Image (cartoon, rainbow, N blue to C red):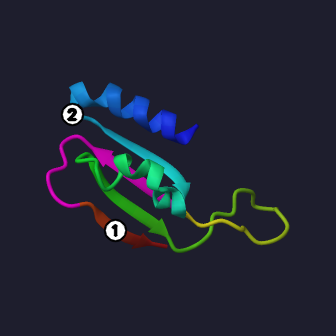
Amino acid sequence: YATQFIERALTFQKPHRGFVAMLLRTDFDHAKSRSYLFANCSAFAMKIVLTKRIKWFEDSKGKPSFNHAWFFWDHNWSTRPQLVYAA
Protein backbone atom coordinates (compact mmCIF):
# COMPACT_ATOMS: atom_id res chain seq x y z
CA TYR A 1 0.00 0.00 0.00
CA ALA A 2 3.02 2.29 -0.16
CA THR A 3 1.98 3.89 -3.45
CA GLN A 4 -1.51 4.74 -2.18
CA PHE A 5 -0.06 6.07 1.09
CA ILE A 6 2.37 8.35 -0.77
CA GLU A 7 -0.37 9.63 -3.09
CA ARG A 8 -2.65 10.45 -0.16
CA ALA A 9 0.12 12.02 1.93
CA LEU A 10 1.19 14.23 -0.99
CA THR A 11 -2.42 15.35 -1.45
CA PHE A 12 -2.72 16.22 2.26
CA GLN A 13 0.63 18.03 2.38
CA LYS A 14 0.28 20.10 -0.80
CA PRO A 15 -1.91 22.87 0.71
CA HIS A 16 0.55 23.18 3.61
CA ARG A 17 3.64 23.10 1.36
CA GLY A 18 4.77 20.15 3.50
CA PHE A 19 6.85 17.06 2.88
CA VAL A 20 6.53 13.28 2.89
CA ALA A 21 9.28 10.81 3.86
CA MET A 22 9.07 7.06 3.29
CA LEU A 23 11.50 4.25 4.12
CA LEU A 24 11.14 1.76 1.26
CA ARG A 25 13.09 -0.87 -0.59
CA THR A 26 15.77 0.74 -2.73
CA ASP A 27 14.22 -0.33 -6.02
CA PHE A 28 10.78 1.18 -5.26
CA ASP A 29 11.40 3.93 -7.82
CA HIS A 30 12.28 1.47 -10.60
CA ALA A 31 8.71 0.68 -11.65
CA LYS A 32 7.51 2.43 -14.81
CA SER A 33 4.01 2.54 -13.35
CA ARG A 34 5.27 4.76 -10.49
CA SER A 35 7.25 7.26 -12.60
CA TYR A 36 4.60 9.89 -11.85
CA LEU A 37 5.86 9.85 -8.24
CA PHE A 38 9.50 10.37 -9.24
CA ALA A 39 10.61 11.55 -12.69
CA ASN A 40 7.33 13.32 -13.36
CA CYS A 41 6.77 14.76 -9.88
CA SER A 42 8.05 18.25 -9.06
CA ALA A 43 7.79 17.50 -5.32
CA PHE A 44 10.20 14.53 -5.46
CA ALA A 45 13.29 15.90 -3.72
CA MET A 46 15.68 13.20 -2.63
CA LYS A 47 16.56 9.53 -2.35
CA ILE A 48 18.93 8.58 0.46
CA VAL A 49 20.30 5.10 -0.15
CA LEU A 50 21.28 3.25 3.01
CA THR A 51 24.58 1.51 2.30
CA LYS A 52 24.12 -0.87 5.24
CA ARG A 53 21.19 -3.23 5.33
CA ILE A 54 18.77 -2.73 8.18
CA LYS A 55 18.90 -5.31 10.95
CA TRP A 56 15.41 -5.00 12.37
CA PHE A 57 16.01 -7.03 15.54
CA GLU A 58 19.20 -7.16 17.59
CA ASP A 59 19.18 -10.91 18.16
CA SER A 60 17.87 -11.96 14.74
CA LYS A 61 19.67 -14.81 13.05
CA GLY A 62 20.91 -14.51 9.49
CA LYS A 63 21.77 -11.49 7.44
CA PRO A 64 19.28 -8.84 6.31
CA SER A 65 18.26 -9.52 2.73
CA PHE A 66 16.91 -6.21 1.43
CA ASN A 67 18.40 -2.82 0.64
CA HIS A 68 16.44 0.25 1.73
CA ALA A 69 16.35 3.96 1.02
CA TRP A 70 14.59 7.03 2.32
CA PHE A 71 12.46 8.77 -0.30
CA PHE A 72 11.52 12.44 0.25
CA TRP A 73 8.90 14.57 -1.45
CA ASP A 74 8.86 18.26 -0.58
CA HIS A 75 6.30 20.71 -1.95
CA ASN A 76 8.84 23.52 -1.39
CA TRP A 77 11.51 21.78 -3.50
CA SER A 78 12.52 23.76 -6.57
CA THR A 79 15.62 22.02 -7.95
CA ARG A 80 16.43 18.62 -9.39
CA PRO A 81 16.12 15.61 -7.07
CA GLN A 82 19.26 14.58 -5.20
CA LEU A 83 20.73 11.11 -4.75
CA VAL A 84 22.61 10.64 -1.47
CA TYR A 85 24.39 7.62 0.02
CA ALA A 86 24.40 7.16 3.78
CA ALA A 87 25.79 4.54 6.13
- Residue 83: assigned label: 1
* Residue position marked by numbered label 2 in the rendering: 17
Q: Is residue 10 left or right of residue 56?
A: left
In the image, the segment drawn in magenta is 69-80
Q: Earlier in the sequence, mark 2 or mark 1?
A: 2
Residue type marked 1: Leu
Q: Is residue 51 above or below residue 47?
A: below
**Residue in the image at 27% along x and 35% along y:** 18
Determine whether the residue tagged by mark 2 lies in a helix, strand or loop: loop
The residue sitting at the left extreme is 78
Determine whether the residue tagged by mark 1 lies in a helix, strand or loop: strand
The answer to the question of whether label 2 and label 1 lie on touching residues, with beta carbons closer than 8 A, is no
Residue count near mark 1 (Cα–Cα under 10 Å), binned few <14, some 14–19, many ≥20: few
The residue sitting at the front extreme is 32
Residue type marked 2: Arg
Image quarter hosting the N terminus: top right
Q: Is residue 65 left or right of residue 32?
A: right
Q: Is residue 74 above or below residue 87?
A: above
Residue 52: percent from left, percent from top: 58, 73
**Residue in the image at 48% along x and 61% along y:** 30
Task: Tell me how many marks there are.
Answer: 2
Q: Is residue 23 left or right of residue 48?
A: right
**Residue in the image at 46% along x and 49% along y:** 33
Residue count near mark 2 (Cα–Cα under 10 Å), binned few <14, some 14–19, many ≥20: few
Residue 86: percent from left, percent from top: 44, 71
Quarter of the image for residue 54 reads: bottom right
The answer to which of 87 and 41 lies nearer the viewer is: 41
Q: Is residue 28 above or below residue 43?
A: below
